[in-house]
């Protein structure tokens, strides 16, 4: 299954209610499942992003639905990137013309 990385930043609303973040994280896993997405890992981070999600999904459409539904709650803004594992990367390079 393709791997996607979502970088999340709290909105003003999200950081104001940061004590609710563990409950929101649990609810996000349920939301993800309803969109056909599986959250594999969630990390609190330092630096330019507040949180990282590593998710498996059958396709980018499911990821887009999840990201929009999550963003619509008003607690985070997200950026999404498709990630290829090393073996997938090697295969892609070997297929270059």
Image (cartoon, helix red, strand yellow):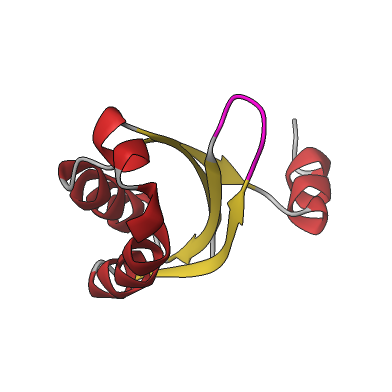
Q: Which span of residues is magenta-colored?
A: 45-49
Most frequent secondary structure within the magenta stretch: loop
Relative placement, left or right, of 39 versus 45 is: left
* Closest to the observer, 78 or 94: 78
Q: Position of residue 3 (x, y in %)?
A: 57, 57
Mark yes or no: residue 46 visible: yes
Q: Residue furthest left?
A: 72
- Say if the magenta span includes residue 48: yes
Question: In percent of the image, x 26 and y 68: which residue is there?
Answer: 31
Question: In percent of the image, x 56 and y 32: which residue is there?
Answer: 49
Question: In percent of the image, x 31 and y 38: which residue is there?
Answer: 16
Relative placement, left or right, of 86 versus 64 is: right
- Say if the magenta span includes residue 69: no
The answer to which quarter of the image holds residue 80 is: top left
* Closest to the observer, 16 or 82: 16
Question: In percent of the image, x 66 and y 27: which residue is there?
Answer: 47
Relative placement, left or right, of 52 versus 69 is: right
Work out which quarter of the rendered image holds the N terminus and state it. Answer: bottom right
Q: Position of residue 32 (x, y in %)?
A: 32, 67
Q: Position of residue 82 (x, y in %)?
A: 54, 43
The answer to which quarter of the image holds residue 43 is: bottom right
């Amino acid at each position: 299954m393709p791997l996607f990385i979502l970088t999340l930043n709290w909105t003003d609303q999200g950081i104001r209610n940061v004590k609710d973040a563990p409950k929101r994280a649990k609810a996000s896993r349920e939301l993800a499942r309803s969109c056909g997405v599986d959250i594999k890992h969630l990390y609190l981070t330092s630096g330019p992003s507040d949180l990282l999600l590593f998710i498996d999904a059958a396709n980018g459409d499911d990821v887009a639905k999840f990201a929009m539904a999550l963003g619509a709650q008003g607690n985070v803004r997200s950026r999404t990137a498709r990630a290829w594992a090393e073996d997938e990367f090697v295969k892609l390079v070997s297929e270059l013309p």
